Amino acid sequence: MDLDVETLKEILGDIATSSKAYVNISNRNLDSGELLRQIWLARSLTKTKAKDLLIDVSLYLKELTEIKEILINNNVITILSIENGTEKELVYFLLPVGIELIKILSELEKNSIEINELLDIINEAHLKFQFVASEEMISRLLEPLKDADKMGAKDAVFCWFLLVSGSVSEKTAFVLKKNEATKEFELQDDIVSYLNYLSEAVYNVSYYSNKFNKIFKSGNLDDFVRRDRNIRSTYGDLFKPDRENSLIYFNATNEEGSLEVEAIRRIIYLTLKKLVYFAIESDKVYTSIPRIVTEFRIDNPIPQANQGSLFVGRPMDDYYPLLEDLVDEQLEVIREENSSDE
């Protein structure tokens, strides 16, 4: 019996699309190692999500039983059982070997193959995935031993706040003073509202407000600011928390006080890389981020009265045009990097 290669690719592609959606993978070209990681790490895997996203066994491959059995028996796909009381709903899920099989089938120069050929190709896919899985395991063992970048979504938004507000020198630093009587930050509620506004504007979705009841809260701002180790480990000497004088800023000017373009470019790249990484809908970030820069340049959402209290001084006249150019430039760099990883 000859098997049509395009039909096999279509079957695997359909199941792959639903499977990667279920484990929260957005990459179009899926890597087997990435799928393996997400199977272990993905959160919010629920019965409802499985029913909505995974393909119902009763509706798919009904007349291609031989192909289905080959793929299941050789651990290319599996059938998951969604239990609901006495009822069970069966759905397909693509295993990481299936990704390697799709790649091999895509490189074939023939339109059809025999069952024995398919079995040989599946064995080849297993060997390739075995190597990938070993690499993933080694990478996981090494991960806690490295000086890894541990910046989170909060850190990324806070650093973006410093950038769009122009806190790139001591003369334009962000001022974070405590009230001597209350021991709380002055204008704390306002600061938190600006940070939450930025997080929602950047990500363009209500994910953080729905899941965490706002990403920043007044009560834990002090704790967040004191624990800036993650930010310092990412930016090194470019990040300057001056606790003695209650100042926080990036160090992006030279001794004469002029802007250091390469330093700002590096800060922007590191910040945007994280903002894009944490975005739920990463494509929208490429438009929402430049829009925020333009907003701060034309009509700063922070009231004038608070600007005078929260910042040592205003950014130089050439800062925002430079920021706009470099943000556009570095977003394109990040977009290309992410495309090559897919």
Image (cartoon, rainbow, N blue to C red):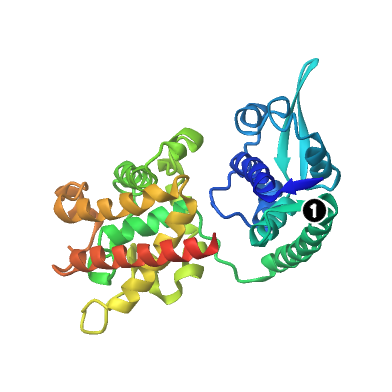
Residue 176 shows in the view? no
x and y, in percent, of residue 216 in the image: 42, 44
Kindly identify the amino acid type of the residue bearing the numbered disc 1. Answer: Leu
Residue corresponding to mark 1:
118
Residue at 20% across, 84% down? 256
Which quadrant of the figure contains the C terminus?
bottom right
- Pinpoint residue 37: horizontal percent, then vertical percent: 68, 53
> Which of the 4 image quarters holds residue 55?
top right
* 210 vs 255: above or below: above
In the rendered view, tell whether residue 317 sits above or below residue 62: below
Residue farthest top in this picture: 86
User: SS of the residue at dot 1?
Assistant: helix
Residue 337 left/right relative to 18: left
Residue 59: image x %, image y %? 68, 26
Q: Quick check: can you spot residue 226?
A: yes
Q: Is residue 200 above or below residue 293?
A: above
> Residue 336: image x %, image y %?
43, 65
Seen from the viewer's position, the closer of residues 188 and 266 is 266
Q: Residue at x 16, y 69 (%)?
A: 316
Numbered label tally:
1
Q: Is residue 218 left or right of residue 94?
A: left
Q: Residue at x 65, y 27 (%)?
A: 51
Q: Residue at x 75, y 67 (%)?
A: 138
Q: Residues within 10 Å of mark 1 (few under 14, many from 20)?
A: many
- Left or right? Give the position of 294 relative to 59: left
On screen, 213 above or below 280? above
